[in-house]
Structure formats: C-alpha cells, structure tokens
Image: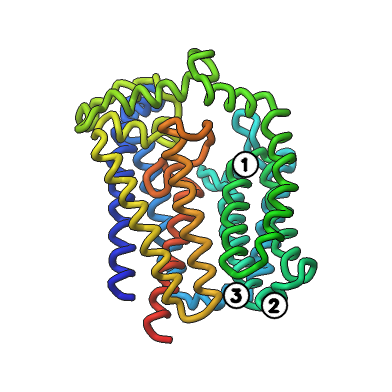
Amino acid sequence: MRNIRISLLMIVLTLIAIGIVMIYSSTAIYGWEHFKDSGYFLKRHLVFLLIGFVFTALAMTIDYRILNRYAKPLVLLSAVMLVMVLAPGVGREVFGAKRWFRLFGLSFQPSEFANLAVIIYVASFLSGKGSRRMDYFIFGFLPPIMVLGLVDILVLAEPDLGTAVALGTVVFIMLFVAGFRLRYLLYIGMCAIPLLYFLIFNVPYRRARIMSFLNPWADPLKSGFQLIQSQVAIGSGGLFGKGLGKSLQKLFYLPAGHTDFIFSLIGEELGFFATLGVLFLFILLFIQGVRIMKYAQDAFGSLLSLGVILLITLKAFINIGVSTGIFPTKGLPLPFISYGGSALIFDMVGVGLLLNVARFGENP
C-alpha cells in the first residue's frame, strides 16, 4: 500500500503542477487587462491550493473511520448549507445561478461539500445497516436514494444539473458494487429519465446547449461559440502544440479558458501528446484509487474510496468530453488543473481520504 500511496500522491502533484503552469499561461493577459496584475488569478489559485493542502493534511491524519459516526450530521449540515445558499441576501448570484457563499473575499460552493458528505453517508449506510437490508427496497435501498434525492433537489434549485447528475451516477455505482439488486437501480433510473428530459428540454438555456452540441455551426456566434472555439484550440495545437504561452484562443476568444475549458488550452499550447498525458494521469489515478478500495481493511473504507475516486475521475471524464465535443457543454472543472475554488479544495480532501484509507490498510 505504501507504493500505491506514493504513486497516487505523485500523480496528483503532477496534475496540480500542470494546473499552476496553465492557469498562469491562460490568465496572465486577462489578469493584466482587468486587474492590472498578470498574476492575479495565479495568486488566488495558490491561496486555494494552500487551503487545500491544509485540509488534505487533516484528512490524511485523522482516522477515517471517525467519519462513519458523523455521516448523518455531515449530510444534514450540507443540506442546511444548500438551503442557506438559496436564501435571499445570503448566496452569491452569478449569471442567474446561486451556488456560492462569499467568505473572506473567496467563494465557497456548498455543493462540493455536499458531494463528499453524501458519499460518506452512503458508504456508512452500505457498510452498516444497509449491508443487512439489501433484499429490502424500503429499508435497504430507499434511505440512500432519499438522501441523494434531497441533496440533488437542492443542487438543482441553484441550478446545477451537471453536479446533480454526476453525484447521482456515483451513488448508483456505489449501490451496484455494494450488491443491491439491479432491478432496484433500473426502477429508479427509468423514473429519472422523464425527469431528466424535462429538466433539459423545458429549460431554454439547457435546450440551447443540447442543440449547439448537436450542431454548433447552426449558431456559431452564440450558443455554439464556446464549443467551436474549444475545438479550434485543440485542433490548432497539432501534435506538439504552439508552445507554452502562445495560445491565441486565450486572447478573449475562448470563454472560461482557465476553468471549464483549460484542457482545450493544454491541447493548443502543448499539443495532442500533452492532452494524452493528462488523460493517462487520470486513468492512473483511477487505477490507484481502485487498488486502495480493493485493499481497504473494512467495507466503509472500501466504499468511501470507491465514491471518492469515481467522483474525481467522472468530473475529469465529463470535462474532457465537453472540451472535445463528446458531451454537451457543462460547467464542471478539470480536477486539480482548473482554476481553484471549492472544487479544487474538496478534490484534494478526497485524495487525503484515499491516502488515509491506504495508510490504515497497511496496518489492519
């Protein structure tokens, strides 16, 4: 397990280092133009990283099994925070979405905490009472689904469909791996499909995203603009890229180039092989996370590891898919690489928990 921990840590540190370089490269001109400081975004990102390292160290040092006892309070706290962020005058609204608190000049997104809290709760339930009730729909399957539903409803109210779908996918996989009957999952999945259709096609901006995904050139200056510019960035980089710092798309052509579409700028500046390298690092990260799950000393640690590594790699998979045009546009950052904030901090905390499980797995 020691080799797994070292490998996992080196992978994450490499991704973080790539992120630091690319954030400065992608924001220096924008920062100077708007704030007269080319290092404006880099400095804030380093602050987020420092906070993340502090919380990661805490997540690594405590006994992760303590979280088993506090799973319910953590979910309750996350639900309260999700309600508070929707309250008038409390949450910070950006482009019509109320997803953030403003604390000490920095933004905090409670849905990122809620993701981790739900995973901890589901891992706790499945390793405790749930493990003895797998044959019962009401007493075994329904409780984690109800908790997931409550959190997802609050996240959807922000609105944030992508986070809700990602968390739901992770929980369903955890339930499947834990041994719940497949037909239970199919029942819920079939009920969710009409709801998902309604949430996408009855909301104008989401419907526009789907239409632009299917044919971005139908509206190249509005709904299809971001996807087109992303593909231009990746395609123009060729095999080896234009060179670090030489992106043209970052010159106010590609929106969210330092957050949701930083993968596209990696392709433009560093080339196809660099994007393959980033993808390979996330694949290695998933493999090491699964190995930690396999060798965990208890069911709670195993399921917790599964949930954490699924959430991180699923967000990476979606982000890369959006940048390359495989998926419709959705605002999920690339873990450890995109400009920091709550997502970066809680992804780092998740890695801390993985390292914690691995550490205790060495000494059962």
Q: Nearer the viewer, mark 2 or mark 1?
A: 2
Q: Residue at x 45, y 25 (%)?
A: 255
Q: Can residue 90 be seen here?
A: no
Residue 282 is left or right of residue 130, and the answer is: left
In the rendered image, residue 266, in percent from the top left (x then y), is placed at 30, 35
Which residue is farthest front? Answer: 183
Q: Residue at x 46, y 23 (%)?
A: 226
Q: Nearer the viewer, mark 3 or mark 2?
A: 2
Q: Which residue is mark 1?
A: 99
The answer for how far apart the CA atoms under marks 3 and 1 are is 27 Å
| Observer-nearest of 139 and 78 | 139
Q: Which residue is mark 2?
A: 129
- Residue 68, labelled with which disc? 3
Q: Can residue 210 be seen here?
A: yes
In this rendering, the count of numbered labels is 3
Above-or-below relation of 121 to 311: below
In the rendered image, residue 314, in percent from the top left (x then y), is placed at 48, 50
Identity, as a three-letter code, of the amino acid under mark 1: Arg
Classify mark 1: helix, strand or loop.
Answer: strand
